[in-house]
Image (cartoon, helix red, strand yellow):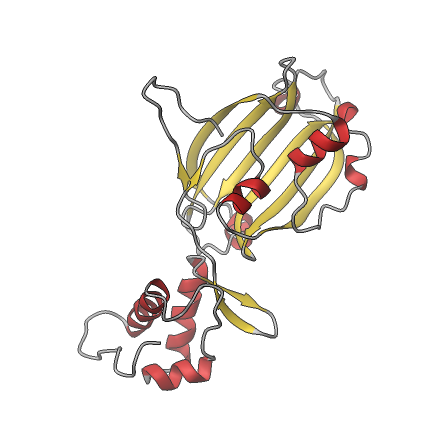
Amino acid sequence: MAARGAVDRADPRPLHKQVYEALLAAINNGRLPLRGKLPSERELVDLYAVSRITIRHAIRELMQQGVVHSQPGKGLYVTQRGGSFELQVLKSFTSIALANGRTPGQHLLDARLVPAPPEISRPLFLGPGAEVVLLSRLRLLDAVPVVIQTDWIPAVRVPGLLNLDWQTGNRSLYEELRERYHIVPRRGQTTLSARLATDSEAATLQLSPPAAVLTVDQIAFDDRNRPVNMTALVHHPLRYPLTLLQSETGDFTQY
């Protein structure tokens, strides 16, 4: 850990910013290891000779950046962090997380049958008002919220999908589609954008408003060119940055 005296009161930077940067440096250089437990609030107050309010402000900033996360009743832990995440259309959030050495998780936000509005039914090649499964989840990396994901799937193709336990940490929609319904996504199309988060999105992703979010809208198709699902993702821009790779032929990796 950083030694006492890391905070310089002659430094023009705010005290909480100095504590934040000292803790971040300790994490980046391995003095606070990945998945390691942070000292208690009282220990940090003594270590940096600052107030509890200053420590809490610094910790809040670390949590907003996804650098540390809270385990209720246990304390604060350093989050396993990777770099950016390559855009993929045919891989699930779960498989991408595991491939990057991260622990995927989810909290169910909404799951129900709904009549598809025109903006959903048209891309899915459905008739007006056809039923779709709406599945909305908060996706987690190492217990830290990173993405709000909402999927719409033609209900006629996935009977019983809502009977599954979508609170399970590693349940993958694409794995269920492949294994249970023999539906295999083969290609997809994507639209990327950015906008200000709504109040609800900011609260869910632990962002301080006004805050920007990355949005990814995609449709996946099977080998018969039938739409498999339509997905809307709202990304925390710092915790889940995206990378788009381009080949020499000019082809882009799709999400």
Instruction: Look at the picture and state if 244 lies above or below 53.
Output: above
* Lateral position of residue 180 relative to residue 86, left or right: right
Q: Nearer the viewer, residue 53 or 150?
A: 150
Q: Nearer the viewer, residue 36 or 234?
A: 36
* Lateral position of residue 54 relative to residue 139, left or right: left
At 38% across and 69% down in the image, what residue appears? 58
At 57% across and 24% down in the image, what residue appears? 219
The quarter of the picture where the N terminus appears is bottom left
At 74% across and 22% down in the image, what residue appears? 129
- State the image coordinates of residue 106 (x, y, percent, origin top left): 63, 50
- Occupied quadrant, residue 177: top right
Tally the marks: 0
- State the image coordinates of residue 172 (x, y, percent, origin top left): 65, 40
Instruction: Look at the picture and state if 252 lies above or below 146.
Output: above
* Lateral position of residue 22 relative to residue 127, left or right: left
- State the image coordinates of residue 204 (x, y, percent, origin top left): 55, 52
- Occupied quadrant, residue 221: top right
At 51% across and 43% down in the image, what residue appears? 99
- State the image coordinates of residue 32 (x, y, percent, origin top left): 40, 70
- Occupied quadrant, residue 25: bottom left
Q: Nearer the viewer, residue 212 or 219?
A: 219
Instruction: Look at the picture and state if 199 lies above or below 29.
Output: above
